[in-house]
Image: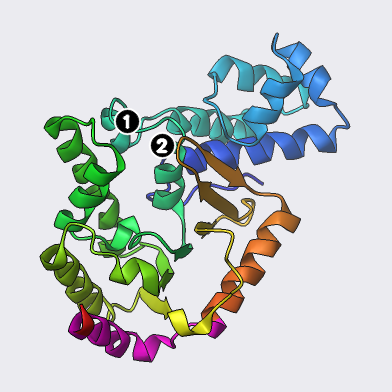
Amino acid sequence: MVTTAQPGGGPTVRRMLLGSQLRRLREDRGITREEAGYSIRASESKISRLELGRVSFKERDVADLLSLYGVTNEDERGPLLSLVREANTPGWWHSFTDVLPNWFQPYIGLEEAASLIRTYELQFVPGLLQTEEYARAVIMDGSKSLDQDTIERRVGVRMNRQLILTRPDGPKLWVVVDEAALRRPIGGPKVLRGQLEHLISMCDQPSLTLQVMPFRFGGHAAEGGAFSILRFPEADLSDVVYLEHLVSAIYLDKREEVERYMEAMNRLSVDSVPPERTADALYSIIKET
């Protein structure tokens, strides 16, 4: 049976879903990636990238793979070939590709498709919770050479990303922010205060769980740095861990790797200020800054 993507899933999740179904069909037939690649005049590594949903699909290639895998019934082929066309439809962020790093664009697609996003951040307030002024300060501090138009377009992307939190089918967001990020005066005291007040106003949102990892705790489970874990409504798709670096990003989906980060996130949630006391913690920081 063909699994379909959820509404609002976007092209990224459709690529992942199509890739997982092609992998299952190939494995069921006992066909190697090398053999599959030969059938579409491609390498074994390209089949791997297709099955992970990391690259776009050609309808002809998918049709040839389906024939190789013995899927000849049009009732079975039709939905998968339709998924190819949906997977190749550009997301809204594609009009901003000139101002976004290549390695970040897949994350926006994953974010759009997720049903649950769990994030730990120690440097900044996470992008989905930033005010426009705070986001502008973060972007300007990150690269002093950007022109004003690029800065404003990147701010626009960040504000557009936040619209998923207002969708009826939007994701649940669980955020743990290190106290250091909440005290760092990005943009100056006025901008920081506005950001903290915005977080307080967000604490009552039913789709958001917000916690603070306090200084007083000392060492904790995520000293290695910030990360996000994304979960999707489609049963065929594994969770994805996103790790961002200065000039690149890593996407992890192997079960053992995801489980390590899930354990760290669970530990952070236990050790941080309980969600019902987050607003009080934020008020205290405002008074002290």
Say which residue appears at 25% left-offset and 56% top-offset. Answer: 163
Q: Check the image and report above or below for 267 versus 95.
A: below
In the rendered structure, the answer to whether residue 56 lies left or right of residue 101 reads: right
According to the image, what is the colour scheme of the structure?
Answer: rainbow
Q: Disc 2 marks which amino acid?
A: Gln
Residue that protrudes farthest toward the top in the picture: 41
Q: Are marks 2 and 1 in contact (CB under 8 Å)?
A: yes
In x, y percent, where is residue 250? Answer: 57, 42
Separation of disc 2 and disc 1 at Cα?
A: 8 Å
Disc assigned to residue 105: 2
Q: Secondary structure at mark 1?
A: helix
Quarter where residue 19 is shown: top right
Q: Is residue 72 visible?
A: no
Say which residue appears at 44% left-offset and 88% top-offset. Answer: 274
Residue 128 is covered by the magenta coloring: no
Say which residue appears at 15% left-offset and 39% top-offset. Answer: 152
Q: Which residues are magenta?
A: 270-287
Disc assigned to residue 38: none
Q: Residues within 10 Å of mark 1 (few under 14, many from 20)?
A: few
In x, y percent, where is residue 92? Answer: 29, 37
In the rendered structure, the answer to whether residue 36 lies left or right of residue 6 reads: right
**Which residue is under mark 1?**
94
The number of numbered discs placed on residues in the rendered structure image is 2
Q: Secondary structure at mark 2?
A: helix
Quarter where residue 89 is shown: top left
Q: Is residue 272 visible?
A: yes
| Quadrant of the frame with the C terminus | bottom left
Magenta-drawn stretch, dominant element (helix, strand or loop): helix
